[in-house]
Amino acid sequence: MLGVIVTIACLVAALWGVNLQQIQESFRQANYWTLPVMLGLLFLFFWLKAYRWRMLLEPVRKLKISEVAPAMMIGFMGNNILPAHLGEFLRVYVLGRQFQIPKTTVLSTVVLERLFDIVAILCYLWCGIYFAPGLSKDYQTASLFLAGIMPVIILVLAAYLIWTEAVIRLFQKLFSLIPFLPEKLTHLVLEMMRAGAEGMASMKSGRLAFGIIWTSFAQWFVNGLSILVALWSFQIEITPLAAFVVLGVTAFGVTVPATPGFFGVVQFCFKISLQPFGVPEAKAFAASIYYHLVQYIPVTLVGLYYSNRTGLKLSDAEREAEKELEDLEGQDGEH
């Protein structure tokens, strides 16, 4: 229910005060010849993700990109159609079952992915806010605050890796103070945190650590380019640094509890992040729909294709993901 409320509220906020005829005109005047470029960037983005995941898994088992990609795409498809980001557990289930890798080990690599994503996205967001021309000094002040909290985040991550259980208990208490937070989402976050500390083996290798770091920054740079191309498709001529601002706001925006697919949330994030650059709201909304659908439709279709190949029925996807979460919680209780 909370996800539905958040989605509706974001969609209303994104459309508030926007002329619907101007949105229609923006779609009519858009340049859709950029679609092949968008799809190419999307392919590169997920290729880099699969390459990084292969490196994270290498200390446990050496796999090819073609072997990890199906489970990864099934997981992202799950995030598009299942509630509470259950796609993360769906990819754990698929890869663990296919290659007989312990589920907690697979989950730990997924958590490390998210940690490196956070660092990379924060860096791009800071660069966008601080260096983008035309922004007021208030935004530069905000960027300095962002730069200041990054070391704090790194220290929190270090504490999490050293004193895992204590940090998890702290977050559990914090979550209990938020009555409207879905219990399923709380369990998901806590279990991912618990598993993440177990996946640091890949970071003991200098080669793997370097590869994981550069691919983390490279993939989000590619995603920022995709946003920039979507904006240019709707005649929104802005600096590439503005795309990094949209990237950062949107990437963190989709972490809030919402309906699967993040519709409404993405549109609201585009609106608020492009306002300081003087972008017309109708064009920002139209560009967000274009970007969102180019991301959503291919990922969902590819994930459905791989789920069919692996014998995972769509009707069973949510049940398997929830069962995986329950199994992981049961394993933790045994410890």
Image: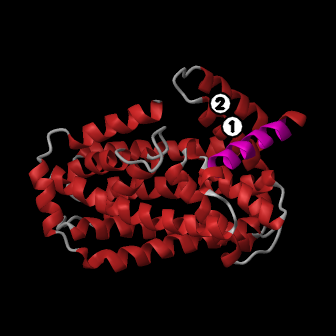
Q: How many marks?
A: 2
Q: Nearer the viewer, residue 148 or 218?
A: 218
* Quadrant housing residue 70: bottom right
* Structural crowding at the residue carrying mark 2, measured as other residues with C-alpha within 10 Å and reported as few (<14), some (14–19) or many (≥20): some
Indicate the secondary structure of the residue bearing disc 1.
helix
Q: Is residue 152 left or right of residue 160?
A: left
323 within the magenta span = yes
Indicate the secondary structure of the residue bearing disc 2.
helix
Which residue lies at the image location 56% right of the left edge and 30% below the top edge? 182
| Res 267 seen here | yes
Q: Nearer the viewer, residue 238 or 69?
A: 69
| Res 163 seen here | no
**How far from the left and from the top, in percent, is residue 54?**
70, 70
Q: Is residue 180 left or right of residue 199?
A: left
Q: Which quarter of the rendering shows the C terminus?
A: top right
Q: Earlier in the sequence, mark 2 or mark 1?
A: 2
**How far from the left and from the top, in percent, is residue 12?**
26, 37
Which residue lies at the image location 63% right of the left edge and 67% below the top edge? 308
153 w.r.t. 211: above or below:
above
Q: Which residues are magenta?
A: 317-332
Q: Are marks 2 and 1 in contact (CB under 8 Å)?
A: yes
Q: Nearer the viewer, residue 274 or 305?
A: 305
* Structural crowding at the residue carrying mark 1, measured as other residues with C-alpha within 10 Å and reported as few (<14), some (14–19) or many (≥20): some
15 within the magenta span = no
Dominant secondary structure of the magenta stretch?
A: helix
Task: Give the label on residue 171, or none.
Answer: 2
Q: CA distance from mark 2 to mark 1?
A: 8 Å
Residue that label 1 marks: 190
Q: Amino acid at mark 1?
A: Leu
* Quadrant housing residue 216: bottom right
